[in-house]
Amino acid sequence: MSLSLVLCLLSFALCYWAGRRSLVSGLIAVIGVGYAYGITRANVSEVFSHFIFDAGVVGLYAAQLFRRLNPLEEFKISHLRPWLEFLIAWPLLLFLIPIQDWLIQFVGLRGNIFLLPFIILGARMDEDDRYRLALWIAGLNLAAFAFAGSEYFLGLERFFPHNHVTELIYISKDLIGHTEYRIPASFANAHSYGGTMVMGLPLLVGALMQKRKTTAHFQLLVLGIAAALLGVLMSAARTHFLAAVILVIVAMFSLRSRFGYALGWLVLLFVIGWTVSGEQRLQRFMELRDTDSVVERVSWSVNMGFFEIAAQYPFGNGLGGGGTSIPYFLQSRIANPVGIENEYGRIMLEQGITGLLIWIGFVLWVITRRDKNPSDSWYIGRRLASVSCVFFFVIAVTGTGLLTSIPQTSLFLLLVGWVGARQPRTELAQAAPVHVGVEAQAAAQQYG
């Protein structure tokens, strides 16, 4: 039995066992596997190594998705469920139309729907779940930063061998006059590293606002946030740097009268700024000052053949026909390969105009959700989650990978579920008599 297959089985078993213990334990296990996925796949260059993370996700699904939900959970996901059914049902229908090779369509199906149930999982999480998950994310951020620091000073070659899997990493040698690489830490590439760091910030900041935290937890969360911000700079991803800046600004202006937290943010940002000022490799974000180049890059992604492709493929080019994370050993099987640097264009290319319209409807629905309870201890965290969703849904017009990045996509969809969930503190007490019955009224009294 190959080592990669053994790792897949271990990933499945770990996440299934953790998922049977609790939802948050399963999420911690899956996200932990995602943090280690990139460097593991790069060093175990076998076919099954591409499915280590997928195996863990299947283990979590097997443990959780068929569990009976309590009335409060049913209430929280009630508005999300119809959207998720549409988002999954349409690609499943397209899968039956053999436009592409069946292996390509299977991989395309994975890229379009496989991780979407994380939306429901995110909606189901309660305050304790989010707090525990945030602590583990802080710890994982520190572990990833240890890899990133080692790669920064010792070089990538000690951690990532040259092969088909690491080709993108070694292409990204565009720092300091194309003499230095972007840092991927333990992830598949630098963009996945930076994106994952940003996606964890709403949970980390939200947990930092909790009164029940111990001194050790406070220190862990602060270090986790610092590691995330430095990780974004080391990944040299300008989009993720911009997202991190927006989240920090929103967090500081949301603190209101909490002077101690505001001062702490200023000290943290000062230390990071002082560190960056002496390291040119961490200053790629300065290229954002070249507004002409930024506008040209955005317009190139947004306009690159979008309407021409829509006219040529109104019903899509088949699942996987837009190049949704197709492994190198399957690339030759793609019929009529067409590339587009735009997530919505990629969805249209694979799911047709109908699939695109379903996604646009869902995106508009999510970004119009509002924070409704400023007295909630997780109010700031949820606001940051909402800002993250809006930012990445909008910026998706400039690139692809929003639904396939490991483990960034899982964290992003958890945030989408959190933002889209009905809020029990403000709605459940009134809605329970009509919608979810006597048991939910009891839950309303407990949680409201």
Image: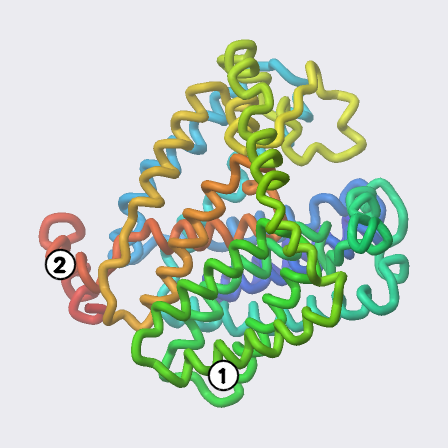
**Camera-side residue of 331 and 202:** 202
Q: Are marks 2 and 1 in contact (CB under 8 Å)?
A: no
In the image, is 438 to the left or to the right of 354?
left
Query: Residue at position x 75%, y 21% from top?
Result: 333
Q: Looking at the picture, which amino acid does disc 2 mark?
A: Val
Mark closer to the observer (2, 1): 1
Residue at the extreme bottom: 215
**Camera-side residue of 110 and 61:** 110
In the picture, the quarter occupied by the C terminus is: bottom left
Q: In the image, residue 273 lies at what x, y percent?
A: 62, 72
Q: Which residue is mark 1?
A: 218
Q: In the image, residue 82 lies at what x, y percent?
A: 32, 37
Residue 356 drawn above or below residue 252: above
Residue 393 drawn above or below residue 383: above
Q: Quadrant of residue 103?
A: top right
Query: Residue at position x 39%, y 28% from top?
Result: 358
Q: Which residue is mark 2?
A: 438
Is residue 289 something one can see in this rendering? Answer: yes
Badge 2, how many Cα within 10 Å: few under 14, some, many 20+? few
Q: In the image, residue 183 lies at what x, y percent?
A: 75, 58
Q: Earlier in the sequence, mark 2 or mark 1?
A: 1
**Camera-side residue of 242 and 355:** 242
Residue at mark 2 to residue at mark 1: CA–CA distance: 39 Å
Q: In the image, residue 94 lies at what x, y percent?
A: 51, 20
* Figure label count: 2
Residue at the extreme top: 312
In the image, is 396 to the left or to the right of 127?
right
Query: Residue at position x 36%, y 65% from top?
Result: 126
In the image, is 437 to the left or to the right of 205?
left
Q: Element under label 2?
A: helix
Q: Looking at the picture, which amino acid does disc 1 mark?
A: Phe
Q: Element under label 1?
A: helix
